[in-house]
Image (tube, grey):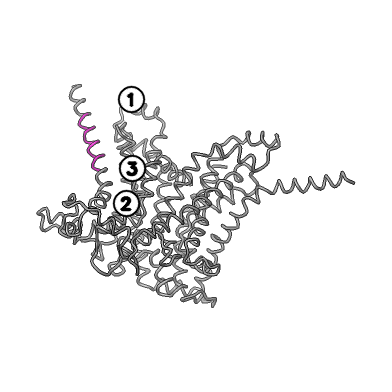
Amino acid sequence: MTTATKSGVNMGRMVLYAALVLFCIYYLLPLYVMVVNSLKPLSEITAGGMMSLPGDWTLAPWATAWSTAQIGVDATGLKPYFVNSLVMVVPAVALSTILGALNGYVLTKWEFKGATLIFGLILFGCFIPFQMVLIPMARMLGLVGLAGSVWGLVFVHLVYGIGFSTLYFRNYYAAFPTELVRAAQIDGAGFFTIFWRILLPSSGPIAVVCIIWQFTNIWNDFLFGASFSDFDSQPMTVALNNLVQSSTGVKEYNVHFAGAIMAALPTLLVYIVAGRYFVRGLMAGSVKG
Amino acid sequence: MSETATARRSGSVDRFRDALPKLVLSPTIAIVAIFVYGFIFFTLYLSFTDSRILPSFGWVGWQNYTNLFRIRAWDTAVTNLIIFGGLYITICCLLGLLLAILLDQKIRAEGFIRTIYLYPMALSFIVTGVAWKWFLDPGIGLEAVVQGWGFESFTFNWIKDGDMAIYTIVIAAVWQTSGFVMAMFLAGLRGIDGEMLKAAQIDGASTFALYRRIVIPQLRPAFMSAFVVLAHMAIKSYDLVIALTNGGPGTATEVPATFMYSYTFTRNQMGIGAASAVIMMMTIAAIIVPYLWSELREKK
């Protein structure tokens, strides 16, 4: 009797682990396809060998994707667009995080009438379909001379990134003991002193969450990049899409896969190094909307 | 004399000190007021005008909306969104729940497996689109590979088939987001009171009954959040469609987001494009506003 139950339990555990492993394969399969096919000659892919390991290992597709592939009119490879994305992402992330921290501080520690309403209005801005702002934003960027530039994209990402960064810091600071702030106030500490000396030193975790979230979102953005950039200022996602969709010449699948990995690598690295914070950001951005 | 001066000065310093927090918040308020709400009203206004290639301010009333609903492509886009959104939300929730329950059985290496399930969420939809586009391509992808293994009659050409292409978008989108839904449900499962489960187990409830009667009903808030997040992602989905099928074959996988873009920027029908954006926003608002309302009220 007991042995029967025990082996039954063991069977159950085995089925459970088998199912889990199967799902692992499902999630890893596209990554496997991208990696192996970026390392083999085109002829092996077109001959029906997409799932096999490379017969003839080569880094040539990577070199082509990085520096000589045809993107739009020029054969520049993805390199300049990778740089565009970096130049765009760094200031946009830094500025939106700083503003978000200050906003969160004001909204929780210097509450005023209507603070919740204002926060709600800011938050709603996170969820609007950006199609709703494309037309006026294109007009405005044209009027101030930022159309088609990386700085225009920095501005756009800053504007629509503030909502989430405010959300993170507000929810984090809401749990921070307000008595400490009041005590410092009685001691004569001013607005910025309190922020700098008391709030900021303990803001490390949420800053990491916020930076990762903004970095991932802005790096992965396609809609704004496609709408507001021109040939020289395209971010990586737009350039990758142009590379893959271009209808001229032979479709070099291996080069496309190499390019796709390049576009994925920065966010994937962040995920691997700081996955815990990534997940926290994801959850805070949704569960506590 | 000097006393009143000091008093006045400290009064203005006080006033400045009182205003400082609001002053710090004001750039954000201005940005949101202009670039979110101002722009929303601008687009709303444009949807009632005769704008074509550029914004123009000739009032045409509901004309753009009536035209919009007569356009075949819009009809296709809405139908596709309903098919895509319905399947995407349902499958993500079911798969996410299943994975969460499986992972909640005191699994060894749980953290590692979770990392694998969730990593697609870190990728751009363009990358996901490229990977699945070629994997599902009948010429080189799954179909060719399986045929190469000797199953000559195997066909899987949904991505080239106008009737089936929309389902390939569901496949790729589910792959990308289901791990995230799993994480949400897993967090919900971890929050359930263990005592209650033990009591039910002692009463002889089977595992299945345990989950159906006690666990899953308690996951309601997680379901709500998942639904809101997935619904709003479905309505906004643009990148994945562009990368995977580019709206094709023909207009078979057109969705409202791609419709809006092409009518506004390539077909020079800005008024109609604006009207379609307004409808997208109204749909999202109908889901998001009650959700934010209840969340923010609870916190107070």
Share a chain, discs 1 and 2?
A: yes
Residue located at (19% from left, 62% from top)? B139
State which tag comes first along the sequence, 1 or 2. 2
Q: Amino acid at mark 1?
A: Ile
Which of the 4 quarters of the picture holds residue B190?
top left
**Closer to us: A276 or A65:** A65
Instruction: State the CA–CA distance, disc 1 to disc 2.
Output: 38 Å
Q: Position of residue B249 (x, y in %)?
A: 27, 67
Instruction: Look at discs 3 and 2 and give the one toward the viewer.
Output: 2
Q: Is residue A20 magenta?
A: yes
Write down the residue under mark 2. Answer: B174
| A120 w.r.t. A12: above or below | below
Q: Position of residue B58 (x, y in %)?
A: 54, 78
Secondary element type, mark 2:
helix
Magenta: main secondary structure = helix
Q: Farthest top residue?
A: A2
Task: Check contact, mark 3 vs mark 2: CB within 8 A.
Answer: no
Mark 1, other Cα within 10 Å: few <14 / some 14–19 / many ≥20: few
The quadrant of the picture occupied by the C terminus of chain B is top right
Q: Which numbered disc covers residue B202?
A: 1
Residue located at (43% from left, 59% from top)? A84
Q: Is residue A273 magenta?
A: no
Q: Which numbered disc covers residue B97?
A: 3
Q: Position of residue B259 (x, y in %)?
A: 39, 67
Q: Amino acid at mark 3?
A: Leu
Instruction: Look at discs 1 and 3 and give the one toward the viewer.
Output: 3
Secondary element type, mark 1:
helix
Residue interval drawn in magenta: A10-22
Share a chain, discs 1 and 3?
A: yes
